[in-house]
Image: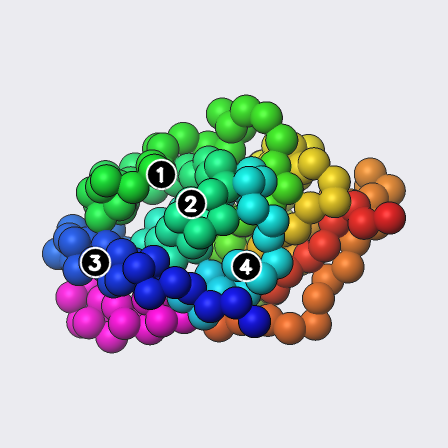
Amino acid sequence: MKRLQTKTARLIAQAFERLDYQKLATIYCDEGGEAFWKDRREPCRTLGIALAEVLLNRLQSGGRSLYVGAGVAEIPMLFMEALELERHVEACNLRVLEVPVVNHACKGLPLRISATDACSARGSYDHLWTVSVLNDPEQYPNVSALSYGRANPVTFNPHAFLEERTKIMAVAEACLKKLAMPALVSTSVEEIPWITDWCDRNRIRYVVEEDDYSTAIVEDPVCLIRVGEK
C-alpha cells in the first residue's frame, strides 16, 4: 500500500496550523466551538490522511475529481490528489464562511474551493466526493432525521420531507451525470441509497465496497462505490 510522501504530510500539517479555529468555531457550532475543535482538530488531520492514503491507492494519476461540500475535513484528500497524483480537482462548498478559511490554509498550492454548488462544475470526472452532503441536517433537516433514525412520527412533516427529497435527487443527478465511467464515488454510508437509486434508474452497474472509513467531524463513516464497471 502506498503512503503519503513526507512532504505532502508536512504540507497538510502546515495547512491545519494555518486554519483560523476561532472562525471555524462559530461556523461549526452555535456554542462550544473552541472545545469542539480542540477535540477534533488532530483526529481530523490523522483520519483524513488515512483516508487520503486509501484514495491514493485507488485513483489514477492525471484524472479529474469533483468534491462537493469540501471543507476542513477534505484538506488531506485534496492535497494528496493535487500534489501526488497531479489530478485536476474541482472543489465547491455552499458554506460560504468556511471557504475563505480553507483557501487561506491552502495558500500557495494548486487548488481552491469555490463558494458554489456542484452544478457549476464543467466537464466529466472519474471520482466524485460527496460526504455528508445529501443528508446535511442544516440543508435537509427532515431527510437527515429520517436517515439517522431521529424522526419523531408525531411531529414528522412528510410534505417538507418530499420537498427535500426532490432537491436531493436533483443534486445527486447534477453530480452523478458528470461521471466518466468507470468511476469511483466516495460517500457516507447514510448516503448510499441516493447513489444506488440513481444507478438503478439509469441501469448503471455499481458495487458498494464492504469496508468503511472513520471520519472526525460529523463522524459519518465513508465508503467507496465503484460505478459503471463492465
Horizontal side of 12 relative to 216 (left or right) equals: left
Q: Is residue 46 magenta?
A: yes
- Quarter containing the N terminus: bottom right
| Front disc: 2 or 1 | 2
Provide the secondary structure element on which disc 2 rests: helix
Residue at 82% of width from left, 38% of height from top?
202
Residues in magenta?
A: 33-48
Mark positioned earlier in the residue sequence (2 or 1):
2
- Which amino acid does the dot numbered 2 rest on? Ala
Vertical side of 39 occupied by 184: above or below = above
Mark positioned earlier in the residue sequence (2 or 4):
4
- The quarter holding residue 175 reads top right
- For the residue carrying disc 1, how many other residues have a C-alpha within 10 Å: few (<14), some (14-19), or many (20+)? some
Give percent across and percent down for residue 96.
30, 37
Provide the secondary structure element on which disc 3 rests: helix
Residue assigned mark 4? 55
- Which amino acid does the dot numbered 3 rest on? Gln
- The quarter holding residue 198 reads top right
Marks 3/1: CA–CA distance = 15 Å
Provide the secondary structure element on which disc 4 rests: helix
Residue assigned mark 2? 82
Residue assigned mark 1? 111
The answer to the question of whether label 2 and label 1 lie on touching residues, with beta carbons closer than 8 A, is: yes
Residue assigned mark 3? 14
